Amino acid sequence: MDKIEQLQQMIAASDNIVFFGGAGVSTESGIPDFRSVDGLYHEQYKYPPETMLSHTFYRGHTAEFFDFYKKKMIFPAAKPNQAHLKLAELEKAGKLKAVVTQNIDGLHQLAGSKRVLELHGSVKRNYCEQCRKFYDDSFILGSVGIPACECGGTVKPDVVLYEEGLDRDTMQQAVMYISRADMLIVGGTSLVVYPAAGMVDYYRGSKLVLINRDSTGADYKANLLIQGNIGEVLGRITLP
C-alpha cells in the first residue's frame, strides 16, 4: 500500500482530526517561508529578519519595521492552495475539528476553515495601541510611513513578534484539541520554533502523520511519514 493510500485510510477511520501546520502550508500559495534555501533568512538586509521582526526593533526603529513588514509579511494577492482547501473540506465533513497554525496569512479562513487557532496572530488584524480600534491589512498597506489611527496612536499588527509571548488562551485551546485528537496531521513545518514545535508532544494517539518537504526532528515519532509538498499530498485525498 502506498503512503497516500495509507493516509486516505487513516482519515477515513478518524473523526477527531487536528491539523498542525507551518510556513510550508503557504509556500504553494506563493508566500516564502523563513528557513528554506529561497526563504526570507537567505535574503540580504541591513539587519537580520529576526531583528527586524522583534519587539525591540518595532519600538526603536518603527518606520523601518513597517517598511520591511509591508514588503515582506503581507501578501494580499495570495490565494488558498490545495492544502487549505482540503482541510476546509475535511472540517465541513465533520472529520477535522481544528487547524492549529503558525502562519499569519489568514489563508485557512479564506479557504473556508472555521476553527483556526493562530499561534502567531494574523496580518489581517491590526489594532491601535492607544484606543484599541481594529484595522485590516489593506489599511497597513495603504499607509505611508508608520500607520496611525484617527486618534493618533500607532496601529500595530496583531502578530507575535520575536521577544513577545504567544497568546495564552490560543495556546491552551491548541493543547486541548491536540491532546484529544484521534489523528494529528503535522504539515509544512520544520518543528524547530518553540513553543509551537512542542505541540506535537501533547498528542496521545497512534495516528501521527508528518508531511513535509524536508526531514524534521520529530520524524521518528511519526506513524506515517510523507516527504513532499503538503498541497500536492492533501490534494490527492478524496472524501466519500
Image: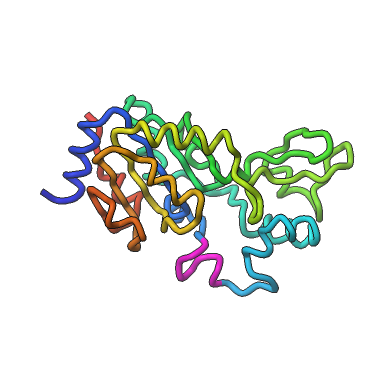
Residue lying at 45% horizontally and 37% vertically, measured from the top left = 175
Q: Is residue 148 above or below residue 57?
A: above
Q: Is residue 162 left or right of residue 90?
A: right
Q: Where residue 196 sits: x, y (%)?
A: 49, 48
Q: Is residue 17 left or right of residue 75?
A: left
Residue lying at 41% horizontally and 41% vertically, measured from the top left = 84
Q: Range of the magenta residues?
A: 34-42
Q: Where residue 134 sits: x, y (%)?
A: 73, 34
Q: Residue furthest right?
A: 152
Q: Is residue 180 above or below residue 26?
A: above
Q: Quadrant of the C terminus?
A: top left
Residue 39 covered by magenta stretch: yes
Q: Is residue 86 above or below residue 45?
A: above
Instruction: Depth check: give the residue in front, 79 or 73.
Output: 73
Instruction: Depth check: give the residue in front, 62 or 26.
Output: 62
Q: Where residue 124 sits: x, y (%)?
A: 63, 41
Q: Main secondary structure of the magenta part?
A: loop
Q: Quadrant of residue 46?
A: bottom right
Instruction: Depth check: give the residue in front, 166 or 231.
Output: 166
